[in-house]
Image (spheres, rainbow, N blue to C red):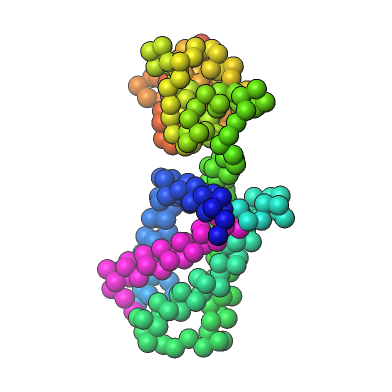
Amino acid sequence: MDRTFLQSTLRELQVFLRSARFWATFAVVVLLFTITGPYGTMNSMPVGTRFAYWLLVQTVAWSIAISFSVMAEILLRRQISSMFCRMMVGSLVAAVPIAASLSVIGFALTGDVTTLVSLLQQIVFTTPLCALFCLLTYMTMHSQIAAASEIANPTIDKTDSPVPILARLKPENRGPILRLAVQDHYTEVVTNRGRELILLRFADAIRETGTVEGMRLHRSHWVAYAHVERLKRDNGKLFVVMQDGTAIPVSRPYAEDARRRFR
């Protein structure tokens, strides 16, 4: 299998594994199914068994759906321009192995043998759930997935790059820029692949972000718009919360612009 494809797949899978929002959504779904006990599990299973059952089912289903969505998102880039459509194709295809996996789980628990008819019924039941899963995933995580997919070639020509500052970073740290920060006489550059200190004036570092859209929030902080989650107040102070959970302080001269931009 192509090494670039494997690297891209692993990179996008890491987006899910590192996302607190993803795990929170997963936990809510498992708890919801445990509490409501759909498909007869409320009467047939005590609460502990029911929780274990739905945890297993959701883990298997989500793992397959995510893997197929990510692979389709990468493999179909030349054929389908829309990331959402690529992910949807993968999710719908995943309905088949998910249905087969659920049938295996059902056989292990009850001993019921799966027939072709029951498998087809399981696929029909699973398909709309896969579509809903794709929709929710895209709505909550498309910016992170897009950021991960931007990393195509770590070799960057500083003179031709729309983001010259990336050429100053080690190849393994080159990726979409999240934020910049002053560290003594250095500028810390944070990308979705790592962070690195470079000896460069902060004003020059901001200038070298090139085509990346962002704004200065403080004399020591700059953020990229695409990776901002929300604004928050803490003890009367204004902060911008990034998608990775980092809170960046907003100083008074930049507060009004930040409120206007991120409200």
Residue 105 location, quadrant: bottom left
State yes or no: residue 63 in magenta: yes
Whether residue 174 appears in this view of the structure is yes
Question: Where's residue 239, x and y in %?
Answer: 44, 24
- Magenta stretch, main secondary structure, is helix
Q: Residue at position x 64%, y 61% from top? A: 89
Residue 57 location, quadrant: bottom left
Q: Residue at position x 59%, y 16% from top? A: 207
Question: Where's residue 187, x and y in %?
Answer: 45, 18
Vertical arrangement, residue 162 with respect to residue 51, above or below:
above
Does residue 221 appear left or right of residue 260 in this picture? left
What's drawn in magenta, residue-wise?
44-72
Vertical arrangement, residue 40 with respect to residue 218, above or below:
below
Question: Where's residue 176, x and y in %?
Answer: 55, 34
State yes or no: residue 258 in magenta: no
The N terminus - image quarter: bottom right
Whether residue 140 appears in this view of the structure is no
Of residues 10 and 231, the one drawn nearer to the viewer in this rendering: 10
Of residues 95 and 1, the one drawn nearer to the viewer in this rendering: 1
Does residue 92 appear left or right of residue 112 in this picture? right
Count of residue discs: 0
Does residue 158 appear left or right of residue 185 in this picture? right
